[in-house]
Amino acid sequence: MTTQEWLLVTAGVAAFVALAVVAVQTVVRDVGIEANRHRARFRAAEIAADTLTREWRSHRPADQFETDQLNRRYGARCDRIGITYADSEALPRWSPGILEAGGGWHAVHKFPVCYVRDVRGERERFGEFTPDY
């Protein structure tokens, strides 16, 4: 082969390698963006659940009827967090409040009442997701 043929072959190989590098970089960037987007959306679901819990705790029910109404209303709102943030695979859980004898919430509610589980994160870490029903 002559010098010109070697130059063409070398240029062709270099162009192919450059194309492969660009393709790999694009795939890696897309995976990174997807992972960060999932974390950001899941964090937004956690913030929404925490906001809902704080709002729920601000109420001071006087009787069992009011307690049941608040638990149903906020339980439904907690379930809607899972719908709103479905793309992040956030699984919402609601722990209903207990009425204190003198009115208000029982002191056992120091933990979040509405919280979310990271279904996608558990599946990635453990290989499967097992609901805690």
Image (tube, rainbow, N blue to C red):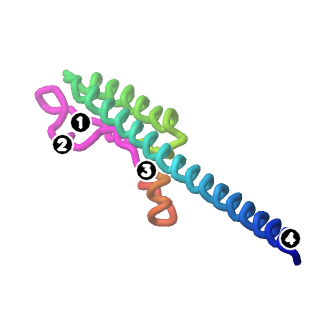
Q: CA distance from mark 3 to mark 2?
A: 24 Å
Q: CA distance from mark 4 to mark 2?
A: 81 Å
Give residue 47's mark: none
Relative to 100, residue 43 above or below:
below
Which mark sits nearer the N-terminus, 2 or 1? 1
Q: Secondary structure at mark 4?
A: helix
Which mark sits nearer the N-terminus, 1 or 3? 1
Q: Position of residue 109 (x, y in %)?
A: 21, 40
Q: Amino acid at mark 4?
A: Glu
Main SS of the magenta part reads loop
Q: Secondary structure at mark 1?
A: loop
Q: Position of residue 24 (x, y in %)?
A: 63, 59
Q: Residue at x 50, y 33 (%)?
A: 84
Q: Residue at x 54, y 41 (%)?
A: 87
Q: Secondary structure at mark 3?
A: strand
Mark 4–mark 3 CB contact (< 8 Å): no
Mark 2–mark 1 CB contact (< 8 Å): yes
**Residue with the most extreme right position:** 1
Q: Amino acid at mark 2?
A: Val
